[in-house]
């Protein structure tokens, strides 16, 4: 399975953010999306998730050689600032989500198992979401994006708010599920990108560019990435 | 100081200008008429700038004129005291009410926040120069109308001239007191959150403004003059106190910190929502339903303080009013025919009552603040099916919440009509009942459909949609102008019922067709 971006164009009024981005994201890999502030990473995710209409080009999913439109159930999207309905408890939010997705989730497990999965403690499960910390909200959001088992996972700077232990758990978790998913995640933390991702993709000047590691050492590869990111400035 | 003032003025102007352009853009017709390029052209900017300055000038006069005209001038003839004395008396005490309500310095507004914290202007210079500008606007804005309306009421011309100065004196005194209070307690009062003392003061001064003249005990010119001289003397001392005061920055800091600030401006409602969310979420509430019904059920129950409780209060008040009227018709001789006549003619008045009693607007605000603005970021929540399912659930809840007070009114009116002697056309009973229920349903549907079709709020609950503002003001004025129109219940009841039913049908069809496209974050 492949997610194919073909000459995707997006601009806000006069500002061209994406200027014909081309890329094929493949199943089984974690892609690290790097780019300067304002390069358009969030915009790209919003376009893939159809939150924004693209001005040109196409975003298609290729399955066994057949191309089709991406539909809502294909995508799980974790926003950089987690938002949750504050008047519900964690358990209630999850119950609501499971209720309405009953048909789409093949094997529904007891709610507590899901909490165990993201390691939200039993004393927190029945507290209102408004009292959850940033990281806990992020976990909840991640959980509802994962449960329905979409094949594409978009993660916008997901690990930034997690403490080191949780971040490590999340990394393990992402590695566990990567073989069945197309995972794209944006980050500003170079070490994380190099450590976790199979491919590094750079968004600069409105286009996507794959960074080949070839046989460079980690240090040299880092320099290469930074050089590529700098290029934007000189344009 | 003048430089600071000019800069702050330009800043405020820029803020308003952008707001105007944004609102223009959000009205579909205008947006389509104007070519896109126009938004980037300096022409539109100049136009919006012009409107913004025009607004500044007209707000200086218009508000004060309406204030004097509606709550003083129009009422003076209903008083037992002479018009001139009533005018002076009401003006005097209402000015004191104003002192409690707004001293400008303790009023947190967005432009202050931008100027002082984002642009790092000198807080003292900023506050003082704007404060003096505020006082100047009072004098300039009031003078023409105290002269005009005062003279028309027979107030001596000297007093007409002094009235604006009296307002300035009172503002100065209240400001000095508030500043002094800050020094004493180290805590700045926020005028968007009135404290009990202020509330009592407001109630007392309002009562003092209207009751005595109504009973024939208004102050005369001599007393007004004496009180004016007295307050002017204190105002001079207050002026120096305000001028010498140093700690404006810390006051602004307390008033305008991101926290208290994120929620202010016209958003009393927003804060009420937020506050009740924080304090009153009833975590014990549970629901046995599932899916969207479960979600909506919990929403309504968790916000019962905000949603159902006030509807219950209104129901109780209506019941009390009904009981009072029934008592009146048995105890007061001659009340019966008056009430009977009213039942047959004042139905238009109830359009306004039903407008006010309806909780629809608060409910949609709560929905946005506490639920939709986060949930709409989830894609499953934005699927047409999801939107419509939840819309149906919410419509049911809103209707039910509002039907509680409506039923009391709708049953109460025919009951009163019957008790006061009845009517020979039985259709009147039916129409009273049907039209009140129709109005209640109408306002409920109106509010929720507007919310789903225009979704006008942003995070701060500021309304960012020109169409919404227009439709809302139109509804308000329509209801307002219905007051006082004496139309036979038979005619008005039929018209309004038919109108409501047609409106409800059309808007529901529209909502079911369009909401999946229009209900989104802005
Ligand atoms: N709704 C919008 N209207 C106008 N311009 C926008 C809008 N959303 C984003 N932009 C602009 O598009 C550009 C890309 O923004 P985007 O949020 O995608 O960047 P990003 O790569 O996610 O940045 P960061 O690393 O800071 O999160 C920015 O210049 C931003 O100003
Ligand atoms: Mg971003």
Image (spheres, rainbow, N blue to C red):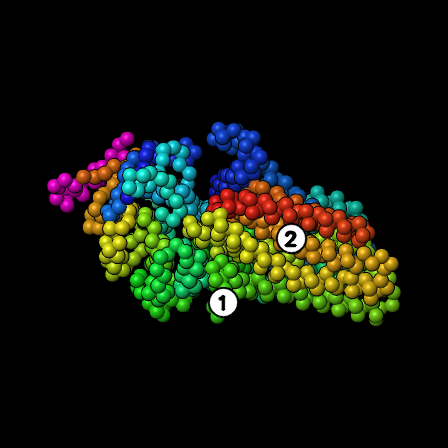
Quarter of the picture for ligand 2?
Answer: top left
Give the labeled residue for mark 2.
Answer: B443
Q: Chain of mark 1?
A: B
Instruction: Find numbered disc 2 in the image and state the secondary structure of the residue it sits on.
Output: helix
Q: Chain of mark 2?
A: B
Q: Is residue A125 left or right of residue B388?
A: left
Q: Residue A153: image x %, image y %?
A: 32, 49
Q: Report the front residue among B16 and B483.
A: B483
Q: Is residue B285 above or below residue B24?
A: below
Magenta stretch, main secondary structure, is: helix
Query: Magenta stretch containing residue B52, yes or no?
Result: no
The residue positioned 39% from the left and 54% from the top of the image is A104
Q: Is residue B311 left or right of residue B158?
A: left
Query: Magenta stretch containing residue A227, yes or no?
Result: yes
Q: Is residue B63 left or right of residue A69?
A: right
Q: Is residue B357 left or right of residue B123?
A: right
Circle on res. B288: 1
Q: Residue B100: image x %, image y %?
A: 61, 58
Residue B90 showing in the rendered view: no
How crowded pointer 2 is (Cα within 10 Å; few <14, some 14-19, many 20+) is rated as: many
Q: Residue A72: image x %, image y %?
A: 40, 47
For marks 1 and 2, give the one nearer the viewer.
1
Q: Which residues are magenta?
A: A213-235
Q: Residue B129: image x %, image y %?
A: 52, 46
**Residue at mark 1 to residue at mark 2: CA–CA distance:** 29 Å
Residue A179 showing in the rendered view: yes
How crowded pointer 1 is (Cα within 10 Å; few <14, some 14-19, many 20+) is rated as: few
């Amino acid at each position: 399975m492949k997610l194919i971006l073909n000459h995707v164009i997006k601009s806000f009024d006069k500002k061209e953010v994406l200027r014909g981005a081309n890329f094929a994201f493949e199943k089984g890999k974690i892609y690290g999306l790097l780019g300067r502030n304002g390069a358009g990473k969030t915009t790209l995710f919003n376009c893939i998730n159809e939150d924004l209409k693209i001005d040109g080009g196409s975003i298609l999913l290729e399955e066994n050689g057949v191309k089709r439109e991406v539909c809502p159930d294909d995508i799980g999207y974790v926003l950089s600032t987690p938002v949750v309905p504050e008047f519900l408890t964690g358990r209630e939010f999850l119950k609501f989500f499971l209720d309405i997705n009953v048909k789409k989730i093949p094997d529904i497990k007891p709610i507590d198992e899901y909490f165990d999965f993201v390691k939200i403690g039993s004393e927190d499960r029945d507290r209102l979401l408004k009292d959850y910390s940033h990281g806990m909200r992020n976990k909840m959001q991640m959980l509802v994006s994962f449960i329905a088992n979409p094949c594409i996972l978009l993660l916008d700077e997901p690990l930034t708010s997690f403490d080191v232990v949780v971040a490590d758990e999340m990394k393990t978790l992402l590695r566990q599920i990567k073989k069945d998913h197309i995972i794209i995640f944006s980050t500003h933390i170079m070490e994380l990108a190099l450590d976790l991702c199979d491919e590094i993709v750079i968004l600069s000047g409105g286009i996507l560019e794959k960074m080949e590691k070839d046989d460079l050492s980690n240090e040299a590869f880092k320099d290469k990435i930074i050089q590529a990111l700098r290029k934007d400035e000189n344009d | 100081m003048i430089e600071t003032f000019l800069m702050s003025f330009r800043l405020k102007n820029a803020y308003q200008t952008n707001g105007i352009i944004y609102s223009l853009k959000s009205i579909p017709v205008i947006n389509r008429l104007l070519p896109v390029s126009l938004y980037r052209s300096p022409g539109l900017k100049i136009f919006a700038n012009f409107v913004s300055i025009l607004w500044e000038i007209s707000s200086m006069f218009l508000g004060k004129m309406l204030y004097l005209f509606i709550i003083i001038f129009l009422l003076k003839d209903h008083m037992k005291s002479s018009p001139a004395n009533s005018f002076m008396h009401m003006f005097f005490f209402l000015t004191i009410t104003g002192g409690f309500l707004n001293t400008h310095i303790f009023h947190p507004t967005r432009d202050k926040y931008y100027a002082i914290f984002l642009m790092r202007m000198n807080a003292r210079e900023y506050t003082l120069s704007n404060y003096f500008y505020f006082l100047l606007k009072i004098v300039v804005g009031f003078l023409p109308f105290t002269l005009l309306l005062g003279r028309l009421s027979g107030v001596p011309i000297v007093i007409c001239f002094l009235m604006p100065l009296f307002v300035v004196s009172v503002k100065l005194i209240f400001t000095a007191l508030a500043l002094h209070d800050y020094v004493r307690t180290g805590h700045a009062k926020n005028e968007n959150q009135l404290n009990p003392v202020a509330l009592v003061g407001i109630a007392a001064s309002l009562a003092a403004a209207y009751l005595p003249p109504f009973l024939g005990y208004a102050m005369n010119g001599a007393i007004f003059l004496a009180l004016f001289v007295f307050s002017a003397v204190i105002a001079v001392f207050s002026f120096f106190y305000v001028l010498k005061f140093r700690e404006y920055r810390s006051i602004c800091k307390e008033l305008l910190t991101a926290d208290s600030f994120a929620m202010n401006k016209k958003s009393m409602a927003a804060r009420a929502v937020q506050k009740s969310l924080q304090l009153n979420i009833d975590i014990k509430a549970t629901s046995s339903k599932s899916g969207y019904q479960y979600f909506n059920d919990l929403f309504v129950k968790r916000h019962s303080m905000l949603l159902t409780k006030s509807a219950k209060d209104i129901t109780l008040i209506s019941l009390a009013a009904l009981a009072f009227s029934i008592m009146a018709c048995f105890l007061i001789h001659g009340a019966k025919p008056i009430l009977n006549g009213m039942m047959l003619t004042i139905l238009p008045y109830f359009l306004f009552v039903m407008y006010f009693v309806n909780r629809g607007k608060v409910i949609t605000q709560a929905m946005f603040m506490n639920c939709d603005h986060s949930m709409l970021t989830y894609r499953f929540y934005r699927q047409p099916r999801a939107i419509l399912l939840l819309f149906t659930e919410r419509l049911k809840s809103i209707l039910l919440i509002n039907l509680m007070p409506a039923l009391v009114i709708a049953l109460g009116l025919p009951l009163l009509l019957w008790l006061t002697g009845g009517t020979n056309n039985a259709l009147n009973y039916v129409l009273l009942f049907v039209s009140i229920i129709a109005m209640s349903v109408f306002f409920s549907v109106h509010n929720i459909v507007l919310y789903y079709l225009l979704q006008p709020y942003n995070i701060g609950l500021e309304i960012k949609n020109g169409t919404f503002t227009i439709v809302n003001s139109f509804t308000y004025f329509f209801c307002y102008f219905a007051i006082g129109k004496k139309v036979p219940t038979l005619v008005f009841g039929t018209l309004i019922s038919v109108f409501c039913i047609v409106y409800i049908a059309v808007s529901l069809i529209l909502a079911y067709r369009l909401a999946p496209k229009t209900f989104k974050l802005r």
